[in-house]
Amino acid sequence: MANWEYCILLRVGTAIDTKWYVNRTFKHSEPGELPAEATEPYFAKLNGQFDKLHAKKVYPVLPAVMNLLGADGWDLIDDMDVGIPGDQGLVFKREVKAKAAKKKRK
């Protein structure tokens, strides 16, 4: 039986130059304080790659973002309404063994 892990790729905005981030998380503290980003290092690295694609100003970047995820073993399985006008989520999954195989190749 396969073990799966999931990630959500979020679109931030609706323009052609929209940014995409995967599994970006924030730790909330006291009311009135800005939350601190708490994204896992693996996903933070991917988000950094997405930012570099965005900085090239060649739009849309979504195909390149999806190619990076696909090359790392992620499969698109669904899209979702995240409840914020203009934002969108794409749900991906991959077998946990794909993650382990990637580590072995390094």
Image: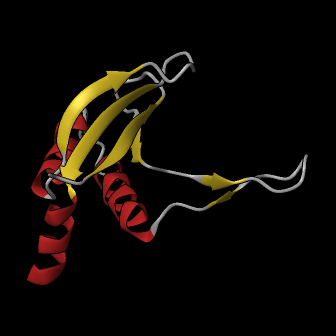
Nearest the eye: 62 or 106 = 106
Q: Is residue 32 left or right of residue 79?
A: right
* Position in image of residue 77 (x %, y %): 21, 31
Q: Please name the residue shown 44% across and 21% down the image.
A: 14
Q: Please name the residue shown 39% across and 48% down the image.
A: 22
Q: Please name the residue shown 38% across and 40% down the image.
A: 8
* Position in image of residue 56 (x %, y %): 28, 50
Q: Please name the residue shown 23% across and 40% down the image.
A: 58
Can you say which quadrant of the picture contains the C terminus? Answer: bottom left
Nearest the eye: 64 or 43 = 43
Q: Is residue 106 above or below residue 3?
A: below
Nearest the eye: 44 or 63 = 44
Q: Is residue 34 left or right of residue 97?
A: right
In this view, the residue farthest toward the top is 85
Q: How many callouts does the rendering have?
A: 0
Q: Is residue 35 above or below residue 81?
A: below
Q: Is residue 11 above or below residue 27?
A: above
Q: Is residue 94 left or right of residue 15?
A: left
* Position in image of residue 10 (x %, y %): 42, 36
Q: Is residue 104 above or below residue 92?
A: below
* Position in image of residue 86 (x %, y %): 49, 18
Residue 65 location, quadrant = top left
In this view, the residue farthest toward the front is 1
Q: What colour scheme has been applied to the protein in the rendered image? A: secondary structure
Residue 63 location, quadrant = top left
